[in-house]
Image (cartoon, helix red, strand yellow):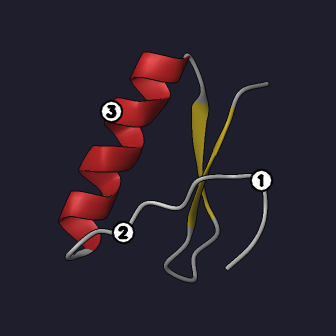
Amino acid sequence: MGGGAPIFYARGAEEQYEVALLLAKVLGAAVHDLHNGVLVIVRH
């Protein structure tokens, strides 16, 4: 898969949210849930 953004894989939904929230906290960003199993972390 190409592109300029990193992709993180998780074993399940719980791990996905934990990783997303931790990354958002470290990066000073926000997590957006697209409601299709995809979370996007954006620094506004």
Q: In which quarter of the image is residue 35?
A: bottom right
Residue type at mark 3: give it: Leu
| Closer to viewer: mark 3 or mark 1 | 1
- For the N terminus, the image quarter is bottom right
Give me the disc on residue 35.
none
Residue at image coords 60%, 26%: 29
* Residue 40 in the image, given as x and y percentages of width and height: 62, 54
What is the three-letter code of the residue carrying label 2?
Tyr
Q: In which quarter of the image is residue 23?
A: top left
Evaluate if marks 1 and 2 touch, with contact meaning CB atoms under 8 Å apart: no
The numbered dot on residue 22 is 3
The crowd level at tag 1 (other Cα within 10 Å; few <14, some 14-19, many 20+) is few
Q: How crowded is mark 2: few (under 14 residues within 10 Å), some or many (20 or more)?
A: few
Which residue does the numbered mark 2 point to in the structure image? 9
Q: Which numbered disc, 1 or 2, marks the residue closer to the eye?
A: 1
Q: Is 19 placed left or right of 28 in the picture?
A: left
Q: In this view, does 24 lie to the left or right of 22?
A: right
Spatial CA distance of label 3 from label 2 is: 14 Å
Find the distance from the CA under tag 3 to the CA under tag 1.
Answer: 21 Å
Helix, strand or loop at mark 2: loop
What is the secondary structure assignment of the residue under circle 3?
Answer: helix
Q: Position of residue 3 (x, y in %)?
A: 78, 64
Q: Tell me what residue is drawn at x 42 percent, y 19 percent.
A: 26
Residue at 27 percent across and 72 percent down: it is 13
Left or right position of 25 against 42: left
Q: What element carries label 1?
A: loop
Note whether 1 is above or below 6 in the view shown. below
Mark 3, Cα crowd under 10 Å, few <14 / some 14-19 / many 20+, is: few
Q: Which amino acid does label 1 sit on?
A: Gly
The residue singled out by tag 1 in the image is 4
